[in-house]
Amino acid sequence: MKTNTAILNPFSVSAYMGPEYFCDRSVETKQLGDALSNGRNVTLISPRRVGKTGLIKHLFQSLNHTDVQCFYIDLFSTSNLQEFTRLFVQEVLTQRVTPFSERVWSEITHFFGTLRPVFGVDPISGMPQCMIDIQPQREEWTLQQIFTYLENSEKPCYVALDEFQTITEYKDVKMEALLRTYIQQLHNVHFIFAGSKRHIMTEMFASAKRPFYRSTQMMHIDVIDEGKYYAFAAKHLSANGQRISEETFHELYTLVDGYTWNIQSLLNRLYQSGVEQIDYNTILQTLNQILQEEMSSYQMICRLITDRQLQVLRAIAKEGRVKEPGSNVFLQKYQLGAYSTVRSALLNLADKELVYLQDDGSYLVYEKFFGIWLKQY
């Protein structure tokens, strides 16, 4: 076995590490960039762990930042207007004061003086930070101020709001209508509304009853082409003295339906192992290690759903994907009983993001490793 500790593991499972470690997406990157540069907002939809966040960050990294300003905000952890506004303001102003600039510092203090901007240093990165004290009952005004600030910027601004469907769960405000009111007045700020819940995102932007109806270019992304992914994987493995055949990579790719995060997780471990000739048995051993590590989490999920939901979930896992969950063949094969109870279970499983409904109407287990574990155990 050969290992090379001097080389950073090129198969990231968390942060975007730069264009050298990003696989393909050239067509999608151009499509997304062309839309923004021509004044079109974009609704970007894909299942989780296929790579929409990586695509956004790759686009932002590739742009000439002397020409545009880019801001990325992940809304997944927010639950109300105040949290949304605080996260938005922090991202925008921190980006503006990084790297340090006396001019920008003065500009922010002047523009947001009444909001008492607080400047500090990130204890991890050592880079400047900027926070604003958002006063109760003034969240909407603060949000309007940040949009005005971006609109008055000397350069076009691109804002990515990831997991955008989260705003539909806010209880304190009609967030879709509020944002639409502000955004439709902007000419210098363009948005990527990214989301992983396809049915909610589609409803938000395709229903005539919703504020954002037909206001964006719709864009869906799928898994990365297998051939391009193989070339990417083989290149980086080869640099570490490792080999993987096209046939073996096909087995790896097929095992997790081409989902980017799962492929990256396996390749990350295989790279770490330093095994010179990677074969299917090596992949299965690596996969089994991951499943063993995650077993307690998977068992907890199973305990948190009803027996019927678990029965339906396991049946889908064993089938791989199910296009007709109401068919007698499927119901009888797994002894699921009446379709009405199965349908109720499917709705709950989809709401918990344990199963995913694809465009062709088929259901599959959302998290690929969990699906494999359900099938095996």
Image (cartoon, rainbow, N blue to C red):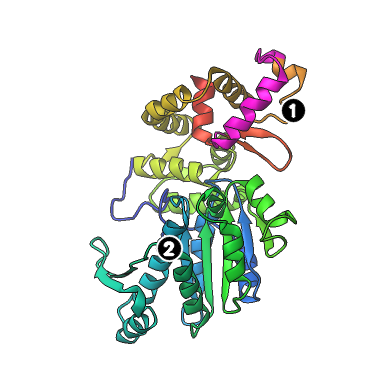
Residue 125 spot, x, y in % from top left: 27, 64
Who is closer to the viewer here, 67 or 231? Answer: 67
Distance in Å between CA atoms under marks 1 and 2: 49 Å
Answer few, some or many: residues within 10 Å of disc 1's Cα (few below 14, many 20 plus, some between 14 and 19): few
Task: Determine whether the residue tagged by mark 2 lies in a helix, strand or loop.
Answer: loop
Q: Quadrant of residue 268?
A: top left
Amino acid type assigned to the residue bearing label 1 in the image: Glu
**Label 1 close to label 2 by CB (< 8 Å):** no
Q: Residue at x 46, y 82 (%)?
A: 66
Q: Residue at x 76, y 17 (%)?
A: 328
Q: Is residue 186 visible to us here?
A: yes
Q: Which residue is mark 1?
A: 324
Amino acid type assigned to the residue bearing label 2 in the image: Gln
Q: Which residue is mark 2?
A: 137
Q: Quadrant of residue 360?
A: top right
Task: Determine whether the residue tagged by mark 1 lies in a helix, strand or loop.
Answer: loop
